[in-house]
Image (tube, rainbow, N blue to C red):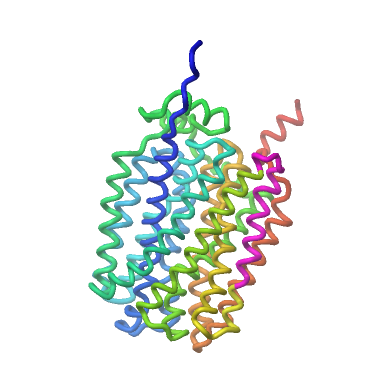
């Protein structure tokens, strides 16, 4: 009797590579937040100017989301991610040589441009490498990179800045990304091209709903982008529910990625080095939240709980918990401020498996475009939130800004409650016509 071939576990090695990509991605988004107080002091920037600089990344990141989704359909993740990593890291190095508002604003825009394809690539890689019943956990793991990485990096980045200044901070973080871009290129392969993934693992992925064939389809060039594809993914209520929810999740995230360290130092009077350690605590809480959410969701699905309840409940609960940020307006001690922030950021992490709904709800042949639109609308928060906060705190009072973040979290929870509805893959208008005729 022939013993069945045991599946390899190459997909988890691939997941580790994606995890590190996400850590570096968010390191190069948040290094400005660490350097913000010194930069604003050196150049005498107002809070409004700092808000605009914080938002600069998202202007181009947003503009290139849909083109990024198109690029993901046409180019191998191996090549596209390597190019993206190396170019955004070069832009990060250049920020260390900024001479004022215009150069810093422009270089942050360049960083946003080159980071734009990153999360659509992440979603494509996970959709290719993981079956449906493992996908939420996989997304939770790589998403946790933005939280766990920053939890440990915040004190490190603060220490680097103390040693080499804010300019040196950008140079060091940029060089790390350049090296890792080369590592990705040498080690990543798509499932059907990976020599270490055996047929048993590929069959496990295929039977579980993994989309192995998208690499072949893309390389053959048989499926080209059409503007009707974009119109399609903008015409469904369910998809708008996840788009709005992503805006809400990202709103709280962008507060923590931009204004949070400056809030602790300039508005709460914490020492710079201590603020780096304090700031790491909410990131650890968010890391716990995203892991709890992903593994709980997959566990419930495996236990026979409906997909709607298993996937939606963590997101709705997490968005509601994120409103705890408002509690920081009513406490004064560092420990209690950080507690409120940690509870809120735990909620953000708990709600951060939202990408699962792209691969779950989107029409199968439009997952990449849907992912681009999803990230596009989510990243509107990266423009709106830092800029609005800059204006709101110009009088020295940060309390209204925290109320603003809490209200956005509440709106996101409502979008999942009332717009997403039942969790089932969206049928295109052509598919509905075909079904009706049949």
Give the side of residue 261 with respect to residue 96, left or right. right
Magenta span: 301-324
Magenta stretch: includes residue 306:
yes
Q: Quadrant of residue 417?
A: bottom right
Q: Main secondary structure of the magenta part?
A: helix
Residue 384 appears at what percent x and percent y? 52, 69
Magenta stretch: includes residue 409:
no
Give the side of residue 328 with respect to residue 26, left or right. right
Q: Which residue is rendered at x = 52% and y = 54% of the image?
A: 375
Q: Which residue is rendered at x = 47% and y = 30% of the image?
A: 217
Q: Quadrant of residue 406?
A: bottom right
In the picture as drawn, the residue positioned furthest to the top comes out as 1
Residue 146 appears at what percent x and percent y? 44, 58
Residue 89 appears at what percent x and percent y? 30, 57
- Which quadrant of the figure contains the C terminus? top right
User: Is 234 situated above or below 56?
Assistant: above
Q: Which residue is rendered at x = 53% and y = 53% of the image?
A: 291
User: Is 107 situated above or below 4?
Assistant: below
User: Is 104 situated above or below 186?
Assistant: below
Q: Quadrant of residue 276?
A: bottom left
Give the side of residue 130 with respect to residue 422, left or right. left
Residue 263 appears at what percent x and percent y? 46, 79
Give the side of residue 425 with respect to residue 226, left or right. right
User: Is 382 situated above or below 355?
Assistant: below
């Amino acid at each position: 009797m022939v013993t069945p071939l045991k599946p390899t576990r190459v997909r988890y090695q691939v997941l580790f590579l994606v995890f590190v990509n996400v850590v570096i991605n968010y390191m190069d988004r948040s290094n400005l937040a660490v350097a913000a107080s010194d930069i604003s002091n050196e150049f005498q920037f107002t809070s409004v100017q700092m808000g605009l600089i914080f938002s600069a990344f998202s202007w181009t990141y947003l503009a290139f989301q849909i083109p990024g989704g198109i690029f993901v359909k046409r180019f191998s993740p191996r090549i596209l991610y390597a190019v993206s990593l190396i170019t955004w890291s070069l832009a990060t190095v250049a920020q260390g040589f900024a001479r004022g508002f215009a150069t810093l604003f422009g270089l942050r825009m360049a960083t946003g441009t080159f980071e734009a394809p990153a999360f659509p690539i992440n979603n494509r890689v996970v959709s290719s490498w993981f079956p449906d019943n493992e996908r939420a956990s996989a997304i939770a793991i790589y998403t946790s990179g933005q939280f766990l990485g920053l939890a440990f990096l915040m004190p490190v980045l603060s220490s680097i800045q103390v040693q080499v200044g804010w300019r040196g901070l950008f140079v060091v973080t940029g060089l790390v990304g350049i090296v890792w871009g080369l590592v990705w290129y040498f080690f990543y392969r798509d499932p059907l091209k990976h020599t270490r993934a055996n047929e048993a693992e590929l069959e496990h992925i295929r039977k579980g709903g993994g989309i192995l064939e998208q690499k072949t389809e893309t390389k053959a060039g048989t499926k080209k982008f059409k503007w009707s594809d974009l119109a399609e993914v903008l015409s469904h209520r369910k998809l708008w529910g996840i788009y709005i929810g992503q805006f809400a999740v990202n709103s709280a995230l962008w507060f923590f990625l931009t204004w949070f360290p400056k809030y602790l130092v300039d508005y709460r009077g914490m020492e710079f080095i201590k603020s780096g350690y304090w700031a790491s605590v909410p990131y650890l809480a968010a890391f716990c939240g995203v892991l709890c959410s992903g593994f709980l969701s997959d566990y419930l699905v495996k236990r026979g709980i409906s997909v709607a309840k298993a996937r939606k409940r963590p997101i709705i609960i997490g968005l509601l918990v994120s409103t705890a940020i408002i509690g920081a307006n009513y406490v004064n001690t560092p420990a209690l401020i950080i507690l409120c922030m940690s509870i809120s950021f735990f909620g953000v992490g708990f709600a951060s498996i939202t990408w699962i709904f792209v691969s779950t709800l989107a029409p199968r042949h439009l997952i990449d475009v849907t992912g681009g639109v999803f990230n596009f609308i989510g990243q509107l928060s990266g423009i709106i939130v830092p800029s609005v906060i800059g204006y709101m705190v110009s009088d020295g009072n940060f309390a209204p800004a925290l109320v603003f973040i809490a209200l956005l979290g509440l709106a996101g929870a409502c979008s999942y409650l009332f717009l997403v509805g039942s969790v089932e893959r969206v049928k295109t208008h052509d598919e509905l016509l075909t079904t009706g005729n049949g």
